[in-house]
Amino acid sequence: MYLGIELLKYMGSKRWMLDNGLGEIIDSRISQYDRFVDLFCGSSSVSWYVASTHKTPVLANDLQEFCRILASSVLCRTGCLGTSWITSWINRANDITSIHPLYYRANSIQQNCEDLNIYKLTTEARNICLSAKTPITLAYGGYYFSPLQSIYLDSLRIALPVRNPYKVVALASLIQAASVCAASPGHTAQPFRPTPTAEPHLRKAWSQKVFERVRYFAEKLSKIDTKTSGFALKGDANTIAKDLNSSDLVFIDPPYSALHYSRFYHVLETLANGQMVSVSGAGRYPPHEFRPRSSYSLQNSSRNSLEQLLETLGQRNTGIIITFPAGKASNGLSGEKVLKIANEWFSIKHKIIKGRFSTLGGNTQNRSARMQSEELIISLYPKNLPKYRLEC
């Protein structure tokens, strides 16, 4: 069963497109192929849809580890999971929390979250977390999360089930819960600051019940009924494309922003990796060398990267479905350029659908958080493919 719901705040989510033409196009083509390959899987909406509605195996890939985990939580298994394991996991985490050296101070702050002056609240919260020995609490406690919330997240990470698929489903639900609870506008680019304008949003975020959110997402994920087990990778799309062939239907939803996605999801990446990380600045960013960078987000390389990818796939006669904004994107590409590049190797069919896209941290003061957009859904067929396939 595909739930058809959004389980993560993600800038490039394709869930709404699945209900507005993308799902139908995938359904009409997938029976001709032995595997579905999602090269930029992101929040995994498309990979999950295919895995739960078709028996075709899915290979998902992304540059970021948290995306690989989200994909794996569904692709690594067949059928639904029960839910009794969730209670056991949360109980273990609760026990770990109760003996955390910062628990009583963190709990005191949480109890007074609504009463303390916002500056006093955040100052005390951050001071508490300075001596933390766990990744989320040390890096993000007092910023994206209250001290108690961050301790809960670390404890849940420590208490993960030992065996898969329970372990990966638990970690995916933890990532989803952190995304929803994070005290930040839209995605997780920068935390709310203790200003009069942001104060109500910060207090509301810090009041979120982490254990309740985790249980909600774990139950939702466990109910997704997958038909055939697949696999998820963390890697470069252009490199992986070299191992594909004519039996693969490839879905391409490349970055369209000149801003690297890792800037907006470093909190989730830290949670996924479970390792201590040095952070700095208003956004609590890790050093650049620890943040994945995509050539598709660089204006001087985005076109060349797409050209190389489509040439590689064209030589291997794969089927392709591409989604991309119809207008010009900030990474220098546009729907028109994508069509022009694809035309060298493929026969093309495309349609335009209307939707809304993220402006990556916009607000009502500088720009809207989401804007109207037109999205292209492009079906590509190798030019030397038998005619019957092109007409399907």
Image: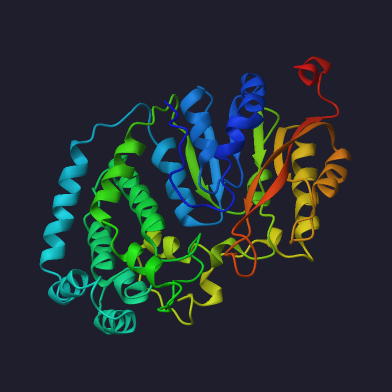
Direction top: furthest residue: 388
Direction from residue 388 to residue 340 in the image, left or right: right
Pinpoint residue 232: horizontal percent, then vertical percent. 49, 43
Front residue of this view, candidates 198 and 210: 198
Q: Residue 142 is drawn in which quadrant? A: bottom left
Q: Is residue 276 above or below residue 272?
A: below
Front residue of this view, candidates 318 and 46: 46
Residue occupying image coordinates x 45% and y 26%: 228
Q: Residue 103 is drawn in which quadrant? A: bottom left
Pinpoint residue 376: horizontal percent, then vertical percent. 74, 40
Direction from residue 165 to residue 11 in the image, left or right: right
Pinpoint residue 155: horizontal percent, then vertical percent. 22, 61
Front residue of this view, candidates 145 and 165: 145
Please state, as top left, top right, bottom left or bottom right, where the C terminus lies in the image.
top right
Please state, as top left, top right, bottom left or bottom right, where the N terminus lies in the image.
top left
Q: Say how many tags the image has.
A: 0
